[in-house]
Amino acid sequence: MGVTDVLTFLRAQPFVPFRVHMSDGRTFDIRHPDQALVARTRLVVGVGAGPMTGVADHLEHLSFIHITGLEEMVPASRD
């Protein structure tokens, strides 16, 4: 995965939340485009943002060489 792949997800209109999969098995949910910043070699993700404040607890720096996949987060169906 690279810069172009991540930017495609972040710039989608309308935005669809997505999950980033890492080579070590971790995942990061991107629920809003402002939660992530794309740099040349990495994706910086705000983690632990409070729903009312939008302020992240900390930042994770994800190297593109360790991002193994991106997937849309489809809301659970309501039966």
Image (cartoon, helix red, strand yellow):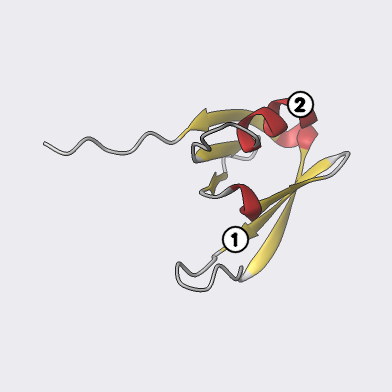
Q: Which residue is mark 2?
A: 4
Label 1 Cα crowd, 10 Å radius (few <14 / some 14-19 / many 20+): some
Q: Residue at x 49, y 70 (%)?
A: 50
Image position, residue 9 (x, y; %)? 61, 32
In the image, 59: left or right of 70?
right
Q: Amino acid at mark 2?
A: Thr
Q: Residue at x 61, y 71 (%)?
A: 57
The image quadrant that residue 59 belongs to is bottom right
Image position, residue 28 (x, y; %)? 56, 47
The image quadrant that residue 48 belongs to is bottom right
User: Secondary structure under badge 2?
Assistant: helix
Label 2 Cα crowd, 10 Å radius (few <14 / some 14-19 / many 20+): few
Image position, residue 40 (x, y; %)? 88, 39
From the image, state whether disc 2 or disc 1 is nearer to you.
2
Up-down relation of residue 47 to residue 24 (above or below):
below
Up-down relation of residue 60 to residue 38 (above or below):
below
Front in this rendered view, residue 4 or 25: 4
Q: Residue at x 46, y 72 (%)?
A: 52
Q: Amino acid at mark 1?
A: Val
Q: Quadrant of the C terminus?
A: top left
Front in this rendered view, residue 39 or 8: 8
Rendered image: mark on residue 47: 1
